[in-house]
Image (tube, grey):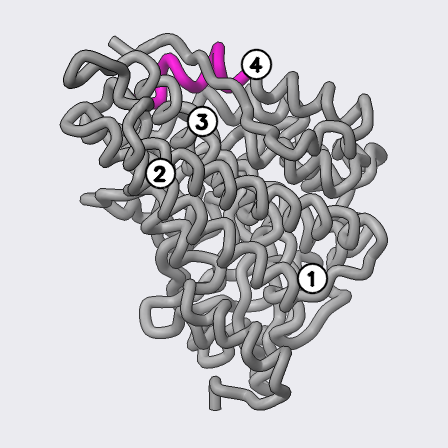
Amino acid sequence: MPQQDLFESPDYYMLDDLLTEEQLMIRGAVRQYVKTEISPIIEDFAQRAEFPQHIVAQLGSLGCFGPTIPAAYGGGGLDYISYGLMMQELERGDSGVRSTASVQGSLVMFPIYAYGSEAQRQKYLPKLASGEWLGCFGLTEPNHGSDPGGMLTTIVDAGDHYVVNGAKQWISNAPFSQVAVVWGKNEAGKIRGIILERGMEGFSTPTTHNKWSLRASATGELVFDNVKVPKENLLPNVEGLKGPLGCLSKARYGIAWGTLGAAMDGYDTALRYSQQRVQFGRPIGGFQLQQKKLAEMITEITKAQLMVWRLGVLMNEGRATPAQISMAKRNSCQVAKDVLSDARQMLGGMGITGEYPIMRHIMNLESVITYEGTHDIHLLITGFDITGLNAFK
């Protein structure tokens, strides 16, 4: 039986004082949703490696899909700190739940809004925002992950339509998506984006099985076998790698906040456990080694909170750089991994069971630290940014 969700958010530097009433209200609404709708079911779905499809409509009604997209298209018209807080609370529940929202908002709705035609915005965004439709993002390929520029998927002009061929791998939401934003190369070798819909002949989405990570999230492939796509489905307003990379910056920003939520959950769980678990005649929280772990956890969480809040301010001002987002994504992932590793040790054998969220978070983070730019790639992005010397070539 899952334990009652007693989560209390750590705020050692009183950062809530920096948030607006609206931001606090949004965070509170998503936190309550996670406590009542996600925490009671997520362990069971993760153990069974099953995606809780019913949450898609719930996330839509809560406003977690495309919260920064203008309200005219079904979005929330919210600022980036509100978006970050939403992702923090969702990942506090489970990385897979946050992934579902991140992909929908940053990787499907954002490119349609930013790079699409007005007709595409009107057709797709309201249905994606409400959760009536689920979407996915096709960039990574079997042979091209960190080097997306080497992609082999093709988008060929065939007169009155385009023909898409190729395959994408490790695609969140793919098995249940009605819409896919796919990136491929045209005859001139230029990268373009195009919108595919389920039911198009030659388009299939096989499920990826046997995952030890993100078990409550749906992962699959996108396979294109001479798929005919209408001309009006091509994203008209972007060409080149800057298209998909612009989407990834938005998603990485959400991950920087999201993984911090997982870290907070680990800290909060370990702190409560240390006050209740008695060994050698007293609570283990009274022993120096355990206090060292807890003190380092809250220190790193607090530093990361300050980083993502400042990054949110820069996002709102339109001044955040992709390299700054990379640094925050990488840092939050590392903080979460370290916090949860220490939390697992503090819980002893109980830390590996489904009675507590620790091990599930740890396994999930092995995916999060890799997708949307690996840990090493983000390090090199920072290195390139500060030295001006490109280590990728």
Which secondary structure lies at badge 4? helix
Query: What residue lies at 65% left-to-right and 27% top-to-bottom?
Result: 130
Q: Residues within 10 Å of mark 4 (few under 14, many from 20)?
A: few
Report the amino acid beneath label 2: Lys
Marks 4/1: CA distance?
37 Å
Marks 3/1: CA distance?
34 Å
Q: For the magenta stretch, what is the residue range?
A: 32-43
Q: Is residue 283 above or below residue 384?
A: above
Query: What residue lies at 69% left-to-right and 44% top-to-bottom?
Result: 309
Query: What residue lies at 64% left-to-right and 76% top-to-bottom?
Result: 240
Q: Which residue is mark 4?
A: 32
Q: Which residue is mark 1?
A: 235
Q: Is residue 202 visible?
A: no
The spot of residue 171 in percent (x, y) is 41, 52
The spot of residue 43 in percent (x, y) is 29, 22
| Dot 4 and dot 3 residues touching (CB under 8 Å) | no
Is residue 33 shown in magenta?
Answer: yes
